[in-house]
Amino acid sequence: MAETTMTKIQGLAKQRGFIYQSSEIYGGFAAVYDYGPYGVELANSIKREWWKEMVQFHENIVGLDSAIFMDPRIWLASGHVSGFSDPLIECKNCNTRLRADQLLEESGVEADEKMSEEVINKLLSDNKTKLKCPSCGKNTFSEVKKFNLLVKSNLGDFNDNWENPVYLRGETCQGIYVNFKNVLDSIRVQIPFGIAQIGKAFRNEITARQFIFRTREFEQMEMQYFTAPDIDMKTFESWRKKRMDFYLNLGIKKENLRWHKHEKLVFYAKEAYDIEYKFPFGFKEIEGIHARGDYDLTQHSKFSGIDLSYTDPKTGEKYIPHVTETSTGVGRNLLMMLCEAYTEEKINNGETRVVMKFPRNLSPVKAAVFPLLKNKPELVKKAKKIFDLLKKSFVCEFDDNGNIGKRYRRQDEIGTPFCITIDFDTLEDNTVTVRDRDTMKQERIVIDNLSDYISKGLL
Ligand code: GAP
């Protein structure tokens, strides 16, 4: 059942121009995806809403766009070079590479990627009879080895000897930490304040499954909130609430969201929670909210030799700020939106209509404009005029292909909230028919009021 829903969503995403496999004409490039025309609109809407919520609505949060390439010492300081790895295992029969923790979990054994090689090897040998390679069904596996997820490049290495690789960033927040002092010195911010960033991240993920849920190239939306060390957990709790409210206000159903509290924390963390969404393949993480203490700025102070402490202008107290992080992925948000919006409905004539019930303000196309008949130049001319007027304020589409029923079905499948039909009455009385995506009800609206009508309908 879950598979069927996911297969349908994946099929629609491709067929309707949301998501394509990368390099498809060359057979596809594993774990990398491209956004098509509607995918990029949807992703932009998600990013816009996040930016509005995190930066525009907070006087003390500023934006940043740091580079993907950074001094490789940053990844030593952050601990990624030594510790950013997943447990890799190989099927001895078909050579499929797997994440050992996932293989164990899928066989009902509790495990996670942070366990040591020894612990995972012991779990594997204790549960040997339960394990099966998902590709060939055999159960002979190699020993586990930790596989580092950082992606390397030879940027600036003109001898091409790969001795000093430069990493493609594995997370965007390191760019925030290393710009903490720049922001502090150039913008009039005082603690507490936050820095927010949206940007690409890269990871050599071992397994590529569940469509765009886990990809090797993806975009993150991260915010690091810097505070004094003695803050109580109120700040952290208020961020937890704000982030959950963000998804609820976007219209995600409450029962499809839940908290996952990390029981085993990394040594520097004070608290860590994930927000999980109920995908067709189960509840999975969409966002992490973590209290990271002073670990990040302390490490970068140590490795760079630059003092990243802050002096309180009122008390003169000097300290390394503590960080509360909120971190989510654009792709996971987009997949959540596709899953949440996908609806099949029986309509009057027994036909099934597929409709993407996106939150209206996120819909890739806000309004579609149709001349009733394609071969009536006066209708086409009037429809074009209305389209030209509306496109200044909204992403709109002009469609004169096929009968009106077919045009509605197509717009339903991309989640367009309003379809506007120009007919012979329009030429007489300057009104049009507006059909609502969700109720399928039709209303006559005066052309002069159309922009207002759509704006109100998108709230
Ligand atoms: N700076 C903290 C950090 O990067 P993370 O849990 O590794 O933490 C945060 O990632 C978010 O980034 C996740 O909740 C998820 O939404 C997204 N993300 C992480 N890895 C991803 C991947 N391989 N593909 C797609 N999204 C990913």
Image (cartoon, rainbow, N blue to C red):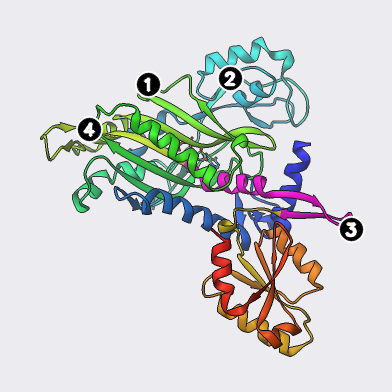
* Of callouts 1 and 4, the N-terminal one: 1
Whether ligand 1 has any atom under 8 Å from the Cβ at mark 3 is answered as no
Q: Dot 1 corresponds to which residue?
A: 267
> What residue is pinned by disc 3?
349
Estimate how packed mark 2 is, as few (under 14), some (14 to 19) or many (20 or more) residues with alpha carbons within 10 Å. Answer: some
Which residues make up the magenta segment? Answer: 328-355
Amino acid type for the residue under numbered disc 4: Ile
Name the residue located 49 percent from the left edge and 41 percent from the top edge.
245
Look at label 3 and name its amino acid. Answer: Asn
User: Residue drawn at (36%, 34%), measured in percent from left and top?
Assistant: 324
How packed is label 3: few (under 14 Cα within 10 Å), some, or many (20 or more)?
Answer: few
Mark 3 and mark 2 lie on one chain; the one further toward the N terminus is 2
- Cα distance in 3D space between marks 1 and 3: 61 Å
Instruction: Return the mark for residue 111.
Output: 2
Image location of residue 150, percent across then percent down: 47, 38
Q: Earlier in the sequence, mark 4 or mark 2?
A: 2
